[in-house]
Amino acid sequence: MGRRSGVLEFAVLGLLHDAPMHGYELRKRLNILLGALRALSYGTLYPCLKSLVAQGFLVEDNPDVEYVPATALNGKRSKIVYRLSPEGKQRFEELLADSGPEAWEDERFGVHFAFFGQTDRAVRMRVLEGRRSRLEERLERMRSSLARARERFDDYTVELQRHGLESVEREVRWLNELIETERANRTGRTGPATGGAAGPQKTSDGRGQEIGSPDPAGPPYDRPGRSSQER
């Protein structure tokens, strides 16, 4: 299974873990979860749903009703409701427990973070630390690239690279806060609130940037899902 389809599988199982949904509602929730820049078409969603049904992870209610995609003209929506099977719940728990390198990548991390409220604390910590390590490696490469770009490219290209660098720097600061909060909760100490008012931080060009402030081009910090507090 490809990386993108694996992310979609995880997102579908996670959303259906909360409650059954028909295809229209599920697509709407997925577009919020995955972000507008990765808007999902029916042509992408329904093959994934059919695959999950075939694998025994999902069950269709009213499967004999033919689905007609909603359009501005017909206004029709799917009457098939999808719900997790016991095997689907087990599969979601397996994906939720995965804290390996794939969980640190951009899209997978965003979806995993949306379900952190259902994730074991030790797994959350491994994912957060792994993500931070991955971004710190990226920062080192980007800083070297930016230094070379100042000598070789025009001001606009340099500015674009600097913008990307600042976005990664902001996420690293955000991850540092989350990790500190997880550690404080584990030891019973009072930790800093995520995105708290600890004062502005300086970016690579010296401008103020609030701690935890999400970058529009970055990961889905405010996407739906349970809170990161313990159940």
Image (tube, grey):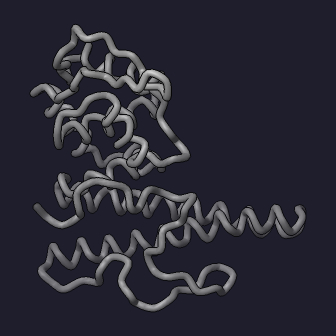
Q: Determine whether, in the image, residue 169 is placed left or right of residue 142.
A: left
* 1 or 218: nearer the viewer: 218
x, y percentage for residue 168? 56, 65
Q: Quadrant of residue 64?
A: top left
x, y percentage for residue 47? 40, 19
Q: Residue furthest top?
A: 64
| Residue displayed at 25% across by 21% down | 79
Q: Determine whether, in the image, residue 84 is placed left or right of residue 223.
A: left
Q: Residue furthest bottom?
A: 199
* 210 or 30: nearer the viewer: 30
x, y percentage for residue 224? 32, 54
| Residue displayed at 19% across by 86% down | 190
Q: Quadrant of the C terminus?
A: bottom left
| Residue displayed at 23% across by 64% down | 228
Count of numbered labels shown in the rendering: 0
x, y percentage for residue 103? 37, 47
Q: Determine whether, in the image, residue 89 is placed left or right of residue 147.
A: left
* 183 or 54: nearer the viewer: 54
Q: Is residue 205 above or below residue 117?
A: below
Q: Quadrant of the N terminus?
A: top left
Residue 101 visible? The answer is no
Q: Is residue 128 above or below residue 96?
A: below
| Residue displayed at 16% across by 84% down | 189
